[in-house]
Amino acid sequence: MPYATRAGDVLADRYRLVDLLSESGGGRFWRAHDRILERHVALHVIGADDPRAGLLQDAARRSATVLDQRILRVLDVERRGDHCFVVNEWGSGTSLDIMLASNGPLSPRRGAWLVAEVADSIAAAHAHGVAHGLLSPENVLLDTAGSVKIIGFCVDAALHGLPPGDPQHDVLDLAGLLYATLTGRWAGASPSHVPRGPEAHGRVLRPRQVRAGVPRPLDDLCDELLNPRGQRVRDVRDLASARGVQSFLSDFVGDPAGLGPAIAAGNPEKNETVVLPAVPEILARPHPDDFVAPEPEPEPEPEPEPEPEPEQPTEAGLPIFDDESDEVSWLRARSTPPAPPPPFEEPPERPLFAAEARRPRFPRADEGPVVSRGDEYWPFDRAATGEGPAALLDDDTREQVPGRNWMRLAMLVAVAVVLLVAVAITVNLSRGKTPLGADPDDGPDPTPSATPTPTPTVEPTPFPGLSAADFDPQGDREENPQEAGLAVDGDPATSWQTLTYKQQLGPVGLKRGVGLVLDLGEARAVRRVQLTLVGAPTTLSVYVTGTAPGDVERLSPVGQLTAATDTATVDLDRASTGRYVTVWLTALPQVSGGWKGGVAEAVVSG
């Protein structure tokens, strides 16, 4: 590069280059320091002989004519020596492409507010006959306070070698910015590093086909600007201009209070303050003829070698840590062997059979008091009745245990009762009678018992006078409403059908489901719902409510099934009372080009 620049160089004796932010296409983008006004500025620099130098100077002059608080102004432009550079205000914040990569798409209301802010400034510039020329997500910033800033006005297009911008080009980029905030994909006319939006048959897919939950007005606006059909859908507003886009989005947003700070609060590294170190003054490089070799520094004196420590025998020990001084000492081995432990004392010998009689625990009339708890005694204690084993046996026979006599008496009574019952049974059997003494033919009079008669099951009766309405709470609230009445007209040849979806319904699809709401006219006890479906297989749920449902997320189904054929019957375990019966389709049959289902006939019985 003939115009080599590096950090520390000073351009026009005023702007000292600090940080190289980006470099592409032979141009460099710097953060520089204005040494006169003591402030940081953004500086674009290319070679003075670059073919874009004239375009860059003209773009800077056009940008300086637009005064808007969101547009970073051009402060200076100069072509001096080997450099051509443009100086802009320094702005800090998070660009839209980084927000989308870090946090994903914005909510519809927040995205509409951000694009409305950009459109307001672009409309002001178009009023002066100036267009941005390269309005991509990289050129839209949101600072920490939640304010929108637009960078690279006119200048960025010139650095890419593009001629002065066209206002219609900016309007397409505004639609692309709205598309990016809703889907995370870029569909504008200018180049961008954000992934390109999907296309089919040469047309950009609508935002609702890329991400579920996009409001219908914003979906129509993007489709109308990005995929023109030759005639306008709306004649009320001029959406072909930046001011018309701004007015439309402002009406959709309503009160914008708090939206900007809310978006900025979720940006990455929002709480980090980057402090750049000061760049020291770099003196001009001397001429080679003035180079003077520096004097050699004297060699340092060698340090004296430490004396070797005498070898010591290796000793094992345990570390001792001092909590106060954080020093470590070692528990050394004993220098003298420890004293031996004291010898064990032999237990006293006890005779196997003592000559004393055992003292009983329970008092008896012929002996003294019982031994109390805590008294120490030898179990073979002496007694006045005698000595030796014979006396011990005599004492055991005389010892009395409380309750033993009553237990023996109860056992004797039980044995006697069993014997008496056995004798009575034996006598009855020997006399040819039953064990209980009755004659074998005797028995209760045979009276005919009442045979339980099964309660006849009443077949459910179909309810007349049904009416049907389409039910699409997760879309645009319309799902072929003109065909809803065909599901209850009594003719299976006619049917209500859904739209054709590119994805199957469910949590990963565009919607979780669509369906029909059957109005019974009044609250009725519903026991059965019979359906003739269009295609198979179809997964569905049935809800019974007293009022017309707005959504099914908080409702509990009374029946669920997957119909393998075109007929389905939902029998309720118990009658459910309500006026409205909702048939909610959660999986549709696959057809050519996607998924599509429907209901040919619905019969509700109770």
Image: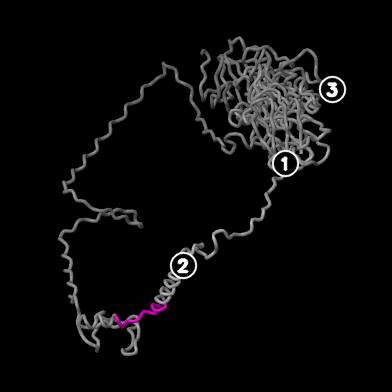
Q: Could you tell me residue 160's position as x and y percent?
A: 62, 14
Neighbours of disc 1 within 10 Å: few (<14), some (14-19), many (20+): few
For discs 3 and 2, the disc positioned in front in the rendered view: 2
Circle 1: element type: loop
Tell me the quarter of the image containing the C terminus: top right
Using the rendered image of the protein, determine whether residue 181 is visible from the camera's viewpoint. no
* Amino acid type indicated by mark 3: Val
- Tell me how far mark 3 sits from mark 1, CA to CA: 63 Å
Q: Is residue 566 above or below residue 383?
A: above
Residue interval drawn in magenta: 397-406
- Is residue 108 among what the camera can see? yes
Q: Report the mark closest to the observer, 3 or 1.
A: 1
Residue 405 falls inside the magenta stretch: yes
User: Tags 3 and 2 in contact by the CB under 8 Å rule?
Assistant: no
Residue holding disc 3: 236
Most distant residue in the front direction: 431
Distance from disc 3 to disc 2, alpha carbons, whole Å, reads: 114 Å
Q: Are marks 3 and 1 in contact (CB under 8 Å)?
A: no
Residue underneath mark 2: 427
Which structural element holds mark 3? loop
- Label for residue 457? 1
Dot 2: few (<14), some (14–19), or many (≥20) neighbours within 10 Å? Answer: some
| Total number of numbered discs in the rendering | 3
